[in-house]
Every structure is written in structure tokens, then in C-alpha cells.
Amino acid sequence: MAKTATREALVEQGALLFARRGVAAVSARELHAAVGSRNESALHYHFGGRDGLVDEILRRHLQAIEDRRAHLVAGLAADERTGEVRGLVHALAAPMAADLGDPVGRAHLRIVAQLSHPSLAYQPPFRVTEAPAGTAVVRWLGAALSGLPAPLRVERLAALRAQLIGLFAQRAQLIDDDPAGAARAPDDGLFVENLLDMLVAGLTAPPSPAALARCSSPASANG
């Protein structure tokens, strides 16, 4: 197998194996066997090891998402809809939804969920690769939710990130592991529209007196 073909096969087969079995459970030997490589140093040669392969899979996935999102972001800006919460959430979700129809795309969604520690929801997003479109959407969402107290806005945006990652990964696993069950479930279009409804409702829900009281507490002010 040519070097380029081996590299691409490792990226594709690695994604499928990592999604199905978990990143930590897949050995270099299994990766080489999956691509039919007799050279057991191919993984190290191309990626420096398993972690390098994971990084490359994530980089490609996030770049593909960013490329799709850029078109949506350009449309929002051109139509002066940067303050429309549903349009902004759609710009985050739709590029992810496009991966549901492809086995490798679904693998990418599942790997991201595996590697997304909950604490990352509270850190600046889109740091693995340059992502001006994604960054713009998050900035516009923050402005659109500026009527909320800052601590509550942080919590809602963190929940948005976790729900997008977790629910798309769950949908991808349903399709992969139980095709019959996926066939009985609503189609992907309905899944996405209903997801948007729920996410927008959560982001824009009027805060309760209890939540507002917590926002003004010393712990929230110091956090």
C-alpha cells in the first residue's frame, strides 16, 4: 500500500475503530491490521503514534464543520440576522447534522463526545483549528443573550455545547449500532428541527427568581 493510501486508510479506519470501541481501547496493532499494513511502524511514521492520529482525525472533522458553517455564517451576516437565536443555533447544529449520513462522519461525532471533558464547556471553544465562523456564532449568541445575567449566560452556553455534542453522538450511535431502531426513530430532519426547538427554548427561557438570586450571590460573582 502506498504511503499516502496508508495514511488515509489509518485516518478512516482509525475513526471507525475509535468510535466503536473507544479511543483508549484501540491498539496500534489493531490499527495496522484494519488497514492491512504489514509495517507496524506505519502509525508512528505518519502520525507519531495513536494520539497524533486522534489529533488528525479531530482536526479534519472540525475543519470540515467549519467549512460548512462558514457559508451559513456568511448568510446570517448578509441578511442581518446575527441577533436571531434560532438562526445562530442552526448554524452550530446543521454542519454537525451533515455527518449523520456518513459512517466516518458519525464516527467523528462519537469521538468528539468521547474526548469532550465537561470542563471544556466552560473554556473558549474552537481551539483545535482556526474557526472564525464558529467563533463568530458564539460571539453573536452571547450578544443575543445579553439580557441575561453573565453567570447565567455562561451556564446556558455551556449547556448548549454539551447538548449539541452529546445528542449528535447519541444519534450517530443509534444509527451505527441499531439500524432497525434508527429506522423506527424520526428522520434526521425532524431530529434536527426538534433539537433546535429545545435548544432555543432553553437558551431564551425567562430565568426564575431562584436562578436570578444565585446569579447575584458571592459565589457566582467570584466564579
Image (cartoon, rainbow, N blue to C red):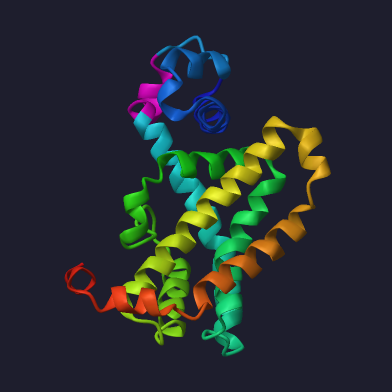
215 displayed left or right of 71: left
Q: Residue furthest top?
A: 38
- Outermost front residue: 210
What residue lies at 81% left-to-right and 34% top-to-bottom? Answer: 180
Question: Between residues 118 and 8, which one lies in front from this camera angle?
Answer: 118
Q: Position of residue 177 (x, y in %)?
A: 68, 31
Q: In the image, residue 17 lies at what x, y percent?
A: 55, 26
> Can you give x and y, in whole percent of width and height, for residue 101 in the image?
72, 46
Quarter occupied by residue 216 = bottom left
Instruction: Specify whether residue 48 is painted magenta.
Output: yes
Instruction: From the top left corner, tell me how far across and down residue 212 is, in percent.
Output: 35, 79
Q: Is residue 58 magenta?
A: no
Q: In which quarter of the image is residue 196?
A: bottom right
Dominant SS in magenta: helix
Please indicate, yes or no, whether residue 71 appears anywhere in the rendered image: no
Q: Can residue 215 be seen in this view?
A: yes
Assign the N terminus to one quadrant of the image.
top right
Which residue does the image show at 35% across and 31% down from the upper left? 51
Q: Give the range drawn in magenta.
A: 41-50
Q: Residue at x 54, y 40 (%)?
A: 110
